[in-house]
Amino acid sequence: MLGRANYVALVGGGRKPKFPTNKVIIWDDAKQLPVVTLEFNSQVFQARLSRSQILVALLNSVSLYAFSSPPKKVSSFETADNPSGLCCLGAKMVAFPGRTPGQVQIVEIGTGNVSIIPAHSSPLKAMTLSPNGEILATASETGTLIRIFSTTNCARISELRRGVDPAAILSLAISPSNTLLAVTSDKATLHIFDLPHSTSSTTTAAAAAAAAAARSSSPSSTSSSSSSHPSNPTKWGILASIPLLPRLFSDTYSFASAPIAIDDDPHAALSGVAKAGVPIPGVAGGKARKGVVGWLDDWTLVVVGAGRDGRWEKFGLGRGEDGRRWVGRLGWKRYLGG
């Protein structure tokens, strides 16, 4: 979806798709009709929109188009296998997997300059650009570490630890102020991290408002957010300063976390009929997407999941009397199925 505009990029999927899986339909919701159609020789895995560009990801390539009628192809790049459709479209650059698994390509839209970042030793699972385009966050299929890079010089500026056990990272999102990173995983957990060079505190009024909103929520909407607790980013206290211990003791952890809802059936059909073990055709990975996270503002997030138990959950950040930050669920609603 294009910000607050009326354009939405649609790609067919599911067992009875409305549109072909090899087409991108730019839908004008004000006129209730398609205004642009892009057709490809293979399945489309992702489409991103900006006010001037359209970015489309196929299994082994990405293509950039000028957002015009008809669209004009600007450039195309080969990638490693990209079944998750990973790609990011910023105001001045695009980012997507490189030709080698674990690498990221960054292309400046204006100049066409290409930079390669050797982000991980295993294939990429998730990636996102900050709103100002200065920071890139990536995660691999291992899912234990999230790496933070500067897009200006491609240097790694931080490494954040989600946990010790491997996990599938579902989504990454950077806050509007470019200071916080939200991470969701198939461990059914939402993590909030500080990003490098960000200030660890914001206005007291904003924190108080978020805390008041969470406290005023009904017990039913907050009962499952018992882990809306403060946590120390270093986690292990004095052990972090002892030399020769494994690095996980000194790694940077999230300062707050909370549980999220994930359907127990990973192959839940979009139509509401579960067929365990049968991939959903036309859907990346064959599974309904879960845990897609987005920021409403610097203190409020929404996590959305599709499938049989499609729902959104709203979370708020706050600060306790001890000064430590927490994240808690403010409410939720099913929008698909029962």
Image (tube, rainbow, N blue to C red):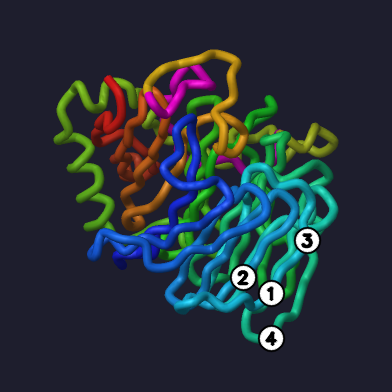
Disc 2 on helix, strand or loop?
strand
**Amino acid on which disc 4 is placed:** Thr
**Principal SS element in the magenta part?**
loop
Vertical relation: 107 (above or below) 224: below
- Which sits earlier in the primary sequence, circle 1 or circle 4? 1
In reply to whether residue 204 is colored magenta, the answer given is no
Residue tagged 4: 111
Disc 4 on helix, strand or loop?
loop
Tell me whether the residue at label 2 lies in contact with that at label 4, contact meaning CB atoms closer than 8 angstroms: no
Which one is closest to the eye, mark 3 or mark 4? 3
Q: Quadrant of the C terminus?
A: top left
Q: Disc 2 and disc 4: Cα gap in Å?
A: 13 Å
- Which sits earlier in the primary sequence, circle 2 or circle 1? 2
Of residues 300 and 250, the one nearer the viewer is 300
- Give the side of residue 162 with respect to residue 67, left or right: right
Tell me residue 32's x, y (percent): 26, 59
Is residue 240 visible in the rendered image? The answer is no
Of residues 264 and 62, the one nearer the viewer is 62
- Give the side of residue 227 with respect to residue 38, left or right: left
Q: Disc 3 and disc 2: Cα gap in Å?
A: 12 Å
- Which sits earlier in the primary sequence, circle 3 or circle 2? 2
Tell me if mark 3 has few (under 14), some (14-19) or many (20+) residues whose alpha carbon lies within 10 angstroms of its own.
Answer: some
Query: What is the span of residues highlighted in magenta in the rendered image?
Result: 249-271
Tell me residue 69's x, y (percent): 45, 78
Tell me if mark 4 has few (under 14), some (14-19) or many (20+) residues whose alpha carbon lies within 10 angstroms of its own.
Answer: few
Residue tagged 2: 64
Residue tagged 3: 78
Of residues 124 and 28, the one nearer the viewer is 28
Residue tagged 1: 75
Disc 1 on helix, strand or loop?
strand
Snapshot quadrant of residue 23: bottom right
